[in-house]
Image (cartoon, helix red, strand yellow):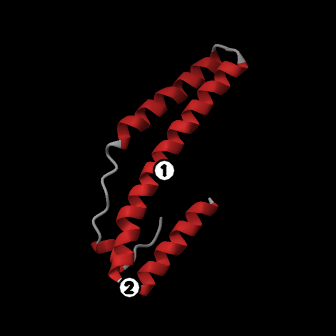
Amino acid sequence: MSKKSPEAMTHQHPDHGKNKGRLKRVQGQIEGVIRMIDEKRYCPDILIQIKASKKALESIEAEILGSHLRGCVQSAMNSKDEKAVSEKIEEIMALMKK
């Protein structure tokens, strides 16, 4: 669990609820991959489905990151609070390392 800065406690975070439907579709894709493995399907067919699931997750990840940059990070930058700006920069750098 990450610690919250004072800025984070007052900033209105974006609603990522619209991604729940997309995540449920990815969940269905993963369940399909499991079925394919249970059915001993052809390896390339399984790999294609895994790659499709990864791409879908990467797309959702990019959207949420964009929201974070346009909302949370921009709010810290606009606040002119050096500590909040520094925290957001460190946060983004840590995310890129994971």
Counting other residues with Cα less than 10 Å from the Cα at mark 1, is it few (<14), some (14-19), or many (20 or more)?
few
Q: Is residue 60 left or right of residue 7?
A: right
Q: Which residue is mark 1?
A: 62
What residue is drawn where x is 49% and y is 80%? Answer: 86
Q: Quadrant of residue 4?
A: bottom left
The secondary structure type at the circle numbered 1 is helix
86, above or below 60, in the image: below
- Tag 2: amino acid: Asp
Q: Residue at x 31, y 57 (%)?
A: 14
Q: Nearer the viewer, residue 16 or 38?
A: 16
Q: Looking at the figure, which quarter contains the C terminus?
A: bottom right
Q: Nearer the viewer, residue 4 or 80?
A: 80
Does residue 51 sit above or below 18 in this rendering?
A: above
* Mark 2, residue position: 81
CA–CA distance in space, label 1 to label 2: 26 Å
Relative horizontal placement of residue 97, taking residue 9 as reference (left or right)? right
Secondary element at tag 2: loop
The x, y position of residue 41, in whole percent, is 67, 14
Residue 24 location in percent, x, y? Answer: 41, 33
